[in-house]
Image (cartoon, rainbow, N blue to C red):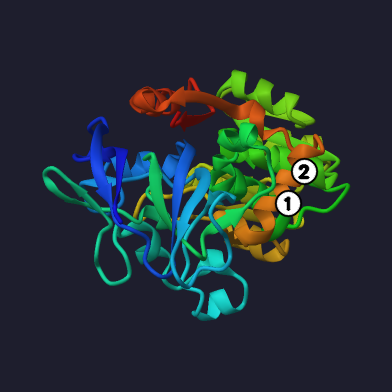
């Protein structure tokens, strides 16, 4: 049977979302119906709302959902009604990357997460004006209910009172922390620098601290965020507007950082991240670039010093194992990502988006109750 839901619909690029009553399909064989408790607002949602990615409109966005399973399709054995879950990115499960347990690089990542439809081209949402695109990141969780998939629902062990906090682990927090822990594998005693201290960058700071990095440097233009970075584990901060960034990092680290992370997607900042590395250092890039942007490096320095530059998607994570790992770190007091979150009621979702864009909120989360 279908489910009547309330959803925030993106109808026009650059316009506020509209709260509407929609009809959601019953779950198919591999789908999971989840009553959404809360959903994080991620930068990727904002990019789609602004029209910079080709997700068709009208659509229900949202891809950091947390909730309770209400029904499962006939082929689903991974979760059962009543389970508390986080919905993360969707994957095919059969391509070479998925078979290698590198799901973040699924060969069908883009169509399964951005095309706003099921694999067969159907949509799961209907409104008074006709079909509404669904299945954004395999969920479309800016709604009271969402259809996830067996592959992208992750069961978590938390009290229901804590469930509204868990959504950001699905993407933004997972991306920053996972890049440090899974992709860069920053070791104990290492030096690490992150460029950009939004929710992704601050998650990276917390992860570097949990890994035991000895020197953790945060770079940003906003002193308030740099202050937060210090509170969360950064040993040093650099204001990119007033300091010689590369020179300052080299001074702090005694010649260059062992590991660097760019969260901005800006080519000039990526160049700084690579230039700030010491010999045999590794930099990771995860910020969403504008289409067609290019990275320019000092080829002689890059080659002769044995530096490495890598691209990272979704923290190089397997959500089924990594999200519970982050939950355990949070329970133990080693990963206080809750300090980044500001809650908004669902009917104020446009305020949450505006505050995120203006930098007034680090990690907005909308709650459905």
User: What residue is at 46 percent from the left and 23 percent from the top?
Assistant: 344
Residue extending farthest to the right is 189
Q: In the rendered image, which residue does mark 1 sit on?
A: 325
Pick the front one: 154 or 106 = 154
Name which residue lies at 56% across and 22% down.
222
Residue 178: image location, x then y, percent: 66, 52
Residue 181 drawn at (x, y percent)? 73, 54
Closer-to-camera residue (210/195): 210
Determine contact: label 2, label 1, CB under 8 Å: yes
Identify the disc placed on residue 329: 2
Task: From the top left corner, tell me how far across and down residue 140 is, in percent.
Answer: 37, 49
Quadrant containing the C terminus in the rendered view: top left
- Residue 255 is at least partly visible in this image: no
Which of 262 and 369 lies nearest the eye of the viewer? Answer: 369
Relative vertical location of residue 221 with respect to residue 5 in this rendering, above or below: above
In the picture, the quarter occupied by the N terminus is bottom left
């Amino acid at each position: 049977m279908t489910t009547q839901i309330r959803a925030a619909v993106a109808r026009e690029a650059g316009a506020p979302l509209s709260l509407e009553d929609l009809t959601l399909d019953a779950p198919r064989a591999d789908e999971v119906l989840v009553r959404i408790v809360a959903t994080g607002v991620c930068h990727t949602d904002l990019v789609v709302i602004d029209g910079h990615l080709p997700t068709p409109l009208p659509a229900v966005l949202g891809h950091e959902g947390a909730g309770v399973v209400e029904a499962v399709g006939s082929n689903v054995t991974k979760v059962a009604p009543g389970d508390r879950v986080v919905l993360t990115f969707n994957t095919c499960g059969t391509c070479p990357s998925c078979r290698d347990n590198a799901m973040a690089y699924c060969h069908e990542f883009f169509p399964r997460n951005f095309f706003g439809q099921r694999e067969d081209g159907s949509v799961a949402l209907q409104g008074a004006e006709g079909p509404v695109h669904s299945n954004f990141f395999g969920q479309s969780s800016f709604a009271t209910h969402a259809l996830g998939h067996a592959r992208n629902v992750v069961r978590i062990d938390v009290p229901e009172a804590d469930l509204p906090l868990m959504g950001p682990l699905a993407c933004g927090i997972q991306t920053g922390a996972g890049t440090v822990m899974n992709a860069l594998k920053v070791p104990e005693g290492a030096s690490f620098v992150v460029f950009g201290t939004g929710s992704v960058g601050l998650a990276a700071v917390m992860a570097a601290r949990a890994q035991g990095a000895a020197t953790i440097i945060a770079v940003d233009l906003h002193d308030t965020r740099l202050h937060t970075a210090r509170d969360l584990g950064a040993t040093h901060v650099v204001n990119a507007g007033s300091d010689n960034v590369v020179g300052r990092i080299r001074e702090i680290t005694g010649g260059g950082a062992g590991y660097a992370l760019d969260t901005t997607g800006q080519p000039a900042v990526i160049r700084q991240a690579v230039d700030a590395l010491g010999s045999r250092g590794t930099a990771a890039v995860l910020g969403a670039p504008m289409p067609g942007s290019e990275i320019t490096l000092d080829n002689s320095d890059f080659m002769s010093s044995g530096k490495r530059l890598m691209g990272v998607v979704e923290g190089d994570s397997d959500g089924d194992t990594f999200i519970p790992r982050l939950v355990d770190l949070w329970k133990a007091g080693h990963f206080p990502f809750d300090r980044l979150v500001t809650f908004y009621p669902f009917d104020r979702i446009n305020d949450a988006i505006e505050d995120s864009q203006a930098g007034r909120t680090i990690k907005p989360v909308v709650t459905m109750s």
